[in-house]
Amino acid sequence: MNLCSMAGTLGISNDTICSGDSTTLSIASFNGTLQWQSFNGTNWIDETGPGATTPDYVVYPTQNTKFRV
């Protein structure tokens, strides 16, 4: 049986944080491999921190940042 990738359900522990705080990005009910990315204003960049390829990814953004998985 050949399983295709399947989009999951995204979540965030807190969508408003102060400088120096963290939030956890999460995805559930997915099928396939993961790679979290952030947007630098021009391009989507692969995240490289611990957990950047796992369902739960803790981030410490220093400015408004868009993420995707």
Image: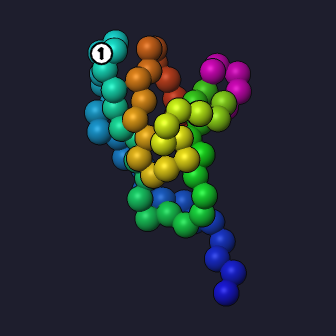
Q: Examine the image and state in which quarter residue 12 appears.
A: top left
Vertically, is 27 above or below 63? below
Residue 1 within the segment the image draws in magenta = no
Q: How is the image coloured?
A: rainbow
For the residue carrying disc 1, how many other residues have a C-alpha within 10 Å: few (<14), some (14-19), or many (20+)?
Answer: few
**Residue farthest front in this picture:** 50
Report x, y in % for residue 63: 45, 14
Q: How many marks?
A: 1
Query: Which residue is depicted at the point 67% across and 31% down?
Result: 44
Identify the residue under disc 1.
18
What segment carries the magenta color? 40-44
In the picture, the quarter occupied by the N terminus is bottom right
Q: Is residue 18 left or right of residue 31?
A: left
Query: Which residue is depicted at the point 40% across and 35% down?
Result: 58
**Residue farthest bottom in this picture:** 1
Closer to the camera, 60 or 6? 60
Vertically, is 35 above or below 18? below
Report x, y in % for residue 66: 52, 29
Closer to the camera, 42 or 33? 33
Q: Examine the image and state in which quarter residue 69 appears.
A: top right
Report x, y in % for residue 59: 42, 30
Report x, y in % for residue 13: 29, 39
User: Could you tell me the amino acid type at mark 1?
Assistant: Cys
Q: Main secondary structure of the magenta part?
A: loop
- Kindly state the secondary structure of the residue where label 1 is placed: loop
Q: Examine the image and state in which quarter residue 9 appears.
A: bottom left
Q: Is residue 55 left or right of residue 1?
A: left
